[in-house]
Amino acid sequence: MSEILDRLSMIGIIPVLALEDAGKAVDVAGALILGGIDCAEVTFRTAAAEDSIRNISKAYPDMLVGAGTVTNTEQVDRALSAGAAFIVTPGYNPKVVNYCVEKRIPIVPGCMDTNSIEMALEAGLDTVKFFPAGQAGGVPMMKALAGPYVNLKFVPTGGVNKDNLLEYLGFKKVIAVGGSWMVKGELVNNGRFDEIERLSREAVEKMLNFHVVHVGIHNDSEEEAEEQVKRFCEIFGFNKEPKTSSTFASDGIEVCRKRFPGVHGHIAVGTPDVARAMYHLAKKGIAFNMDTAKYKNGRLTSVYLEDEIGGFGIHLMQE
Ligand code: 3PG
């Protein structure tokens, strides 16, 4: 995947904008950024697309802005000269795809069947937009399409919203979801930038889905730990589950036989994608201790925050 698509996969949500007035583009982009989404797909569905891309790129050079609903090469040129970093198309248009491939511009073409997917693979692409996702069969259809094409990744868009985004992102071949639910025309036209920010924040929170998974008690010896596990199990009838360096008393209490980061103990916070959570938390100034990072099949599954809270080490954990 290209660097641009890598970053889109960290952001996880791509707002799809159809702006009538390029004068509102910067306010919309600002609201998205405040809400935690630092990318946007500005669609050529309106005449204001090119100027909107230009205005956003100028005001927020760090925002990842792409052009959507691109249906010809002239629009590609206009989008690029306005500052677009990637191109999205509703369907598979060989002329547009080949043009972008030649220019080494990341392109995510709309595909909803095996024919268009094979054309995308033939063109050397590894990521397609599954569009219109909801109407084309949703997660089950996307999974079925993914079956034969083991390395193919998807950006489902169309009918995605806050209530089903986790279902889409839960499929590991999905790098990000796209959608317009946080940037609906009426919100933009009525200047409801506060609501765009709120809906964006809500979407990011839903996606990161932070929740407490377990509390860890740190010990200096195996005997101490064994004694504590025994008490939890005696008092509450919890199940005992031994692991490599700790024993769980129920799913929620990890009694460690040694010390992990955290003076008093640690708290594990679950999230579906640890790397994506790190990306979003880093924007809030949160630092991580990468010496504590754990990986499974090349995927980051656990890492401690640099700082403790109340004497507790805090680690993210893939759930
Ligand atoms: C698109 O062009 O990607 C879609 O119109 C976005 O779909 P949605 O409006 O259902 O989110």
Image: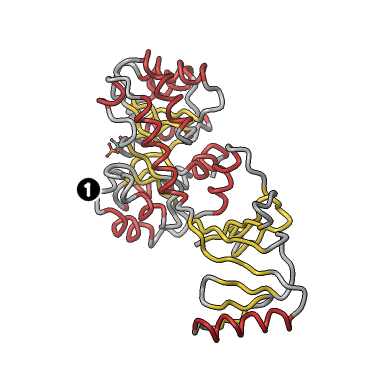
Q: Which image quadrant is residue 91 in?
A: top left
> Which residue is identified by label 1?
135
Quadrant assignment, res 198: top left
In the displayed orientation, state which residue is furthest to the right: 220
In terms of secondary structure, where does tag 1 sit? loop
Q: Residue at x 62, y 78 (%)?
A: 247
10 Å crowding of disc 1: few (<14), some (14-19), many (20+): few
Q: Relative to 39, does residue 131 appear above or below in the rendering?
A: below
- Give the residue at x 29% y 24%: 45
Give whichever of 265, 24 is nearer the camera: 265
How was the colour assigned to the protein in this rendering? secondary structure
Q: How many marks?
A: 1
Q: Quadrant of residue 197?
A: top left
Quarter of the picture holding the N terminus:
top right
Residue sitting farthest toward the left:
135
| Residue 171 x/y as whole percent | 41, 57
Q: Which three-letter amino acid code belongs to the residue tagged 1?
A: Gln
Residue 134 appears left or right of 178: left
- Measured as percent of width and height from the top left, residue 214 is found at 55, 66
Q: Locate residue 87, reporting x and y percent.
A: 43, 31
